[in-house]
Amino acid sequence: MPKKQLYQLVTLLSVLAYGWLIYNSFFTNTSGEGITVCWFKTVSGLPCPACGSTSGIVEIFKGNFYKAFQYNPFAYSSLFILIASSFWVTYDISTKKDGFYRFYLTVNNKLKKKRIIIPIILLFLIIWMWNIYKAIH
Amino acid sequence: MDTSKVDLFLMTNAKYFESYQIPAIKNMIQDLDDDKFIVLQTLNLKDPTVALILSLLNIVAPFSFDRFFIGDIGLGIIKLLTCGGLFIWIIVDWFIIMERTRQVNYEKLQQALMYNA
């Protein structure tokens, strides 16, 4: 992927994500009944592996770390990736460097190894099953 | 390399590349030695049609099969974490995944030629 395209994508996703988080933190009531944007949940009734991340991140902002973990453990990783990548890209664009791009290429090559990607996929499946279990009970 | 071999390679593998890349590829492999032909034949090129089918399969389950298949694993994980980019990314990928696959194939060919030239 060319550098410019990657930076545009990260900028777009970060802006959308920050907007979505601000909307959820300040403009929804605290009963936990926000609007569902997950098309998979709307169609099939079952949660997807990432469902619950938004509620989790909002709980992290409030300081309820255990409750955030209960919603979805990916809340932590998503928040970390969002903050790290958005700051790094802003830094790269303002100083005209390409550190984030080189880091992305390195990580992409590392992830092609079977012993790294298989545990990640297993983790996704386990959390998905946990999500479905929570939705049923 | 022999002209017949160049033509053979281009004929059998044209669908893996964009049409505007073909002249550049021809120039690149014409300068190669004959014994490098086996390197070209064993390149693990990805079929754009398979990528499109996998991309369409993303409606059934919110996984990013297409991105994993062509080797954009970092983006694949981000796509998974955002539930298919709220479905928007999935739809966008139906239209751009074939072009992206051909681009990945071209990069792969360039890399292989760089190491074996």
Image (cartoon, coloured by chain):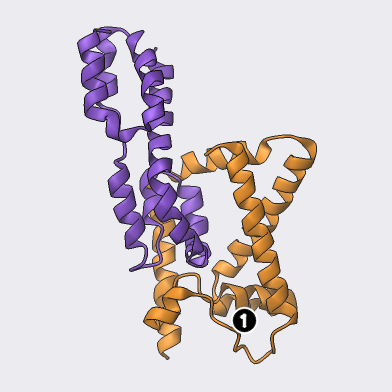
Which residue appears farthest toward the right when viewing the image? A94
Residue found at x 70% / y 68%:
A19
Position of residue B4 in the picture relative to residue B23 (left or right): left
Q: Closest to the observer: B4 or A124?
A: B4
Position of residue B75 in the picture relative to residue A67 (left or right): left
**Disc 1 chain ID:** A
Residue found at x 62% / y 81%:
A67
Residue B114 percent location from the top left of the image: 43, 18
Q: Vertical placement of A9 versus A50: above or below?
A: above
Residue B75 percent location from the top left of the image: 50, 51
Q: Closest to the observer: A114 or B68?
A: B68
Residue found at x 42% / y 74%:
A40
Residue B46 percent location from the top left of the image: 31, 39
User: Which chain is purple in the picture?
Assistant: B
Q: Closest to the observer: A14 or A48?
A: A14
> What amino acid is at disc 1?
Lys
Could you tell me which secondary element the residue under label 1 belongs to? helix
- Chain A colour is orange
Residue beneath disc 1: A67
| Image quarter of residue B10 | top left
Q: Vertical placement of B21 versus A66: above or below?
A: above
| Image quarter of residue A12 | bottom right
Q: Vertical placement of B47 versus A132: above or below?
A: above
| Image quarter of residue B36 | top left
Question: Looking at the image, can residue A125 be seen?
Answer: yes
Residue B37 percent location from the top left of the image: 25, 16
Q: Vertical placement of B80 versus A42: above or below?
A: above
Mark 1 Cα within 10 Å, few/some/many (few <14, many 20+)? Answer: some
